[in-house]
Image (spheres, rainbow, N blue to C red):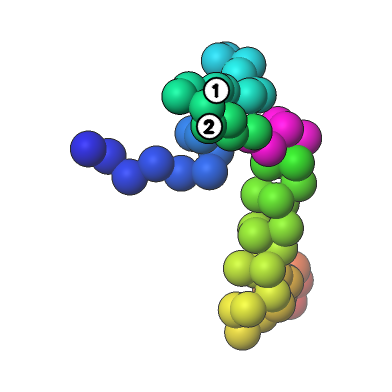
């Protein structure tokens, strides 16, 4: 069984469109797709901020053909 990513789960939920399930007197509500997308963006920002470069990339540009 392959590891499931958040993006895969959002895509599956968008296709299925199921928000609420009830069985044997137990009901379960799922997060809305908008909330899942917002949570995914939050986790991506949190992951980028935890790295040493805080999500920023610095590059040194040197002009070619000069001198």
Q: Is residue 3 left or right of residue 38?
A: left
Q: Which residue is mark 2?
A: 26
In the image, what residue occupies the spot 53% across and 43% down? 6
Question: Residue 28 lies in magenta, yes or no?
Answer: no
Residue 53, position as x, y percentages in the image: 66, 80
Q: Residue furthest front?
A: 25
Q: Examine the rendered structure and indicate whether residue 61 appears above or below residue 20.
A: below
In the image, what residue occupies the spot 27% across and 39% down? 2
Residue 50 shows in the view:
yes
Quadrant for residue 33, please give it: top right
Q: Is residue 6 left or right of residue 54?
A: left
Q: Quadrant of the C terminus?
A: bottom right
Q: Quadrant of the N terminus?
A: top left
Of 62 and 23, nearer the camera is 23
What is the span of residues highlighted in magenta in the rendered image?
30-34
Question: Residue 32 lies in magenta, yes or no?
Answer: yes
Q: Which residue is mark 1?
A: 22
Quadrant for residue 14, please give it: top right
User: Is disc 1 placed on a helix, strand or loop?
Assistant: strand
């Amino acid at each position: 069984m392959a590891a499931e990513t958040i993006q895969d789960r959002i895509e599956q939920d968008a296709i299925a469109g199921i928000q609420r399930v009830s069985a044997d007197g137990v009901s379960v509500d799922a997060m809305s797709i908008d909330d899942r997308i917002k949570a995914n963006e939050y986790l991506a920002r949190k992951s980028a901020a935890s790295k040493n470069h805080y999500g920023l990339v610095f590059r040194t540009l040197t002009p070619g053909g000069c001198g």
